[in-house]
Image: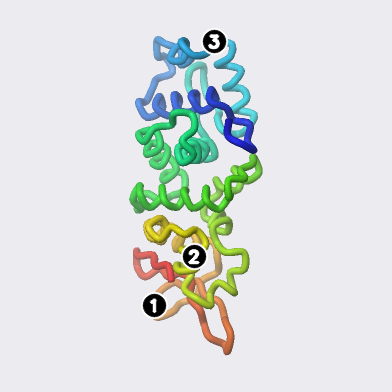
C-alpha cells in the first residue's frame, strides 16, 4: 500500500500491465483480455473492481473493451512506487513511464535521465507525505515546479537557485540532471524578461540588484 493514496499492490500490478500493453500497441481485438495476464494473482472480478477504483482515482481511463489509457498521475504513481521499492515496479517499467511523461509534458527534447530526476525531486518534495490532492498537482507541468522550489523564492535568490535546491534535497547529482527541466518549467510558468538576448526569469533583490533564476538562450535552458 502507498501511504496517503489508497493504492495497493494489485492496483500497481494493473497499472504496470496496462503500461506494457500500451507500449506493445495491444489492439482492441486482441484475443486475450488483459485480466488473463493476472489470472494467477487475482480473479476476473477483482481485476475489474480494481480497474474501476483506478478510474475513480483519475489514474486510468477505459476507452474500449480491452483498451485503457493511463493518466500522467498514474505514470507518476508508478515512478513513486519504483523510488519506494513497492509493488515490484522494475526499471524497465520506470523508464517506460518516464517516456510517457515526457510526451505528456512536452519534453521530447530532454533526456530520460533529466525527466526521471525531475520526477524524483517531485517525490522528494513530498517528504513521504503523499495524497490524492498532491498527485493531482504533481501531474501539471510546468506548474508543478512550484512544489520543488523553496517556500520563499525571493529569499532563495540570495544564493544561486541551483545551490539552494542542492541544500534543500541533499542530492547534487539529481538536481544537476533535473536542472534544464526545472529551468524550462520556470521559463514557461513565470513572466520573463530579456537579458542579453536570453529569455529570463528574474527577481529584483536587495539594493535593486536583479537576481536571475533561469534563462533560455536559443534552445538551451540554464538554471542559475
- Disc 2 to disc 3, how far (Cα)? 48 Å
On screen, residue 171 versus residue 72, left or right, reads left
Residue depicted at 64% across the width and 40% down the height: 132
From this view, report whether residue 6 is shown above or below residue 140.
above
Which quarter of the rendering shows the N terminus? top right
Sequence order check, earlier mark of 1 and 2: 2
Residue depicted at 37% across the width and 49% down the height: 108
Q: Residue furthest front?
A: 170
Check whether the beta carbons of the residues at disc 2 and disc 3 lie within 8 A of each other: no
Residue depicted at 42% across the width and 67% down the height: 223
Secondary structure under the numbered disc 3 in the rendered image: loop
Sequence order check, earlier mark of 2 and 3: 3
From this view, report whether residue 1 is shown above or below residue 151.
above
Q: Nearer the viewer, mark 2 or mark 3?
A: 2
Instruction: Give the numbered dot on residue 60.
Output: none
Q: Which residue is mark 1?
A: 197
Sequence order check, earlier mark of 1 and 3: 3
Instruction: Give the numbered dot on residue 167.
Output: 2
> How many callouts does the rendering have?
3
On screen, residue 42 versus residue 102, left or right, reads right
Q: Position of residue 117 (x, y in %)?
A: 42, 51
- Disc 1 to disc 3, how far (Cα)? 61 Å
Q: Position of residue 211 (x, y in %)?
A: 50, 79
Q: Which residue is mark 3?
A: 43
Would you say residue 136 is visible in this rendering?
no
Q: Residues within 10 Å of mark 3 (few under 14, many from 20)?
A: few
Amino acid at each position: 500500500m502507498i501511504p496517503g493514496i489508497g493504492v495497493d499492490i494489485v492496483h500497481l500490478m494493473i497499472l504496470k500491465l496496462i503500461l506494457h500493453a500500451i507500449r506493445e500497441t495491444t489492439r482492441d481485438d486482441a484475443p486475450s483480455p488483459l485480466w488473463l495476464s493476472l489470472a494467477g494473482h487475482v480473479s476476473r472480478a477483482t481485476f475489474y473492481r480494481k480497474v474501476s477504483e483506478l478510474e475513480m482515482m483519475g489514474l486510468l481511463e477505459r476507452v474500449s473493451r480491452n483498451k485503457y489509457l493511463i493518466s500522467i498521475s498514474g505514470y507518476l504513481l508508478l515512478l513513486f512506487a519504483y523510488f519506494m521499492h513497492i509493488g515490484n515496479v522494475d526499471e524497465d517499467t520506470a523508464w517506460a513511464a518516464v517516456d510517457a511523461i515526457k510526451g505528456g509534458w512536452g519534453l521530447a527534447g530532454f533526456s530520460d535521465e533529466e525527466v526521471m530526476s525531475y520526477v524524483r525531486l517531485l517525490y522528494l518534495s513530498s517528504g513521504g507525505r503523499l495524497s490524492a490532492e498532491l498527485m493531482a498537482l504533481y501531474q501539471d507541468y510546468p506548474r508543478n515546479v512550484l512544489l520543488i522550489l523553496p517556500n520563499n523564492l525571493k529569499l532563495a535568490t540570495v544564493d544561486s537557485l541551483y545551490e539552494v535546491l542542492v541544500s534543500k534535497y541533499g542530492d547534487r547529482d539529481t538536481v544537476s540532471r533535473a536542472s534544464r527541466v526545472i529551468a524550462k518549467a520556470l521559463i514557461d510558468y513565470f513572466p520573463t524578461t530579456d537579458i542579453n538576448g536570453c529569455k529570463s526569469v528574474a527577481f529584483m533583490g536587495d539594493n535593486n540588484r536583479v537576481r536571475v533564476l533561469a534563462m533560455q538562450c536559443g534552445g538551451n535552458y540554464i538554471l542559475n
